[in-house]
Image: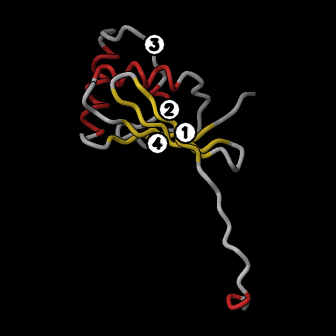
């Protein structure tokens, strides 16, 4: 079983394809000092490969961001639960986590149809 999430990765100030291509070369040559499942989760352009159980995404993204210390990574996640929507920003090993806030408009009789 497990909990599935859809992930999408982008970068704020660089080309995601270039970053992921470079990371994939390091991965293939065993040059990384950590294990990662990123290439089972994301395509080379940062879009989701498939829904995944990437439980270690935060630790892995912290490590990946240290390899590219000037790059701001933006990881979006949408979990199985309807309210489990978030974005995590990573830069040089640090993380900012932002959860979606669902807000409904107040009742407005003029909008009744």
Q: How many C-alpha atoms fall within 10 Å of the one at disc 3: few (<14), some, or many (≥20)?
A: few
Q: Are marks 2 and 1 in contact (CB under 8 Å)?
A: yes
Q: Residue at x 60, y 46 (%)?
A: 85
Q: Please report whichever mark, 2 or 4, sits nearer to the chain's N-terminal start.
A: 4
Using residue 43 as the reference point, say whether residue 1 is left or right of it. Answer: right
Residue at the spot of label 3: 35
Q: Nearer the viewer, mark 2 or mark 4?
A: 4
Mark 2: few/some/many CA within 10 Å (<14, 14-19, 20+): many
Give the vertical position of 23 relative to 44 (above or below): above
Image x and y of residue 57, in percent: 52, 26
The x and y percentages for residue 87 are 50, 42
- Sequence-first tag of 3 and 2: 3
Question: Real-space Cα distance between discs 4 and 3?
Answer: 19 Å
From the viewer's perspective, tell me whether residue 76 is left or right of residue 23. Answer: right
Which numbered dot is residue 50? Answer: 1
Q: Residue at x 59, y 44 (%)?
A: 78
Q: Earlier in the sequence, mark 2 or mark 1?
A: 2
Task: Check residue 87 in the rendering and tell me which mark sits there, or answer none.
Answer: none
- Rounded to the nearest angstrom, the CA distance separating label 1 from label 3 is 19 Å
Around disc 1, counting alpha carbons within 10 Å, would you say few (fewer than 14), some (14 to 19), or many (20 or more)?
some
Q: Secondary structure at mark 3?
A: loop
Instruction: Provide residue 60's location: percent of width, then percent of height.
Output: 46, 21
Quarter of the figure with residue 71 = top left
Query: Which one is in front in this view, the residue at disc 1 or the one at disc 4?
Result: 4
**Quadrant (top left, top right, bottom left, bottom right) of the N terminus:** top right
Residue picked out by circle 4: 8
Secondary structure at badge 4 equals strand
Kindly state the secondary structure of the residue where label 2 is placed. helix
Frontmost residue, 84 versus 50: 84
The answer to whether the residues at label 1 and label 4 have Cβ atoms under 8 Å apart is: no
Q: Which is more N-terminal, label 3 or label 4?
A: 4
Q: Which mark is residue 41?
A: 2
């Amino acid at each position: 079983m497990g909990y599935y999430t859809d992930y999408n990765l982008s970068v704020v100030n660089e080309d995601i394809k270039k970053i992921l291509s470079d990371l994939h070369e390091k991965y293939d040559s065993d040059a990384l000092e950590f294990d990662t499942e990123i290439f089972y989760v994301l395509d080379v352009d940062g879009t989701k490969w498939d829904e995944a159980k990437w439980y270690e995404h935060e630790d892995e993204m912290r490590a990946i961001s240290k390899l590219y210390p000037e790059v701001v990574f933006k990881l979006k996640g949408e979990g199985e639960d309807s309210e489990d929507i978030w974005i995590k920003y990573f830069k040089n090993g640090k993380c900012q986590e932002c959860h979606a806030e669902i807000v409904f408009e107040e009742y407005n009789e003029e909008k009744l149809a």
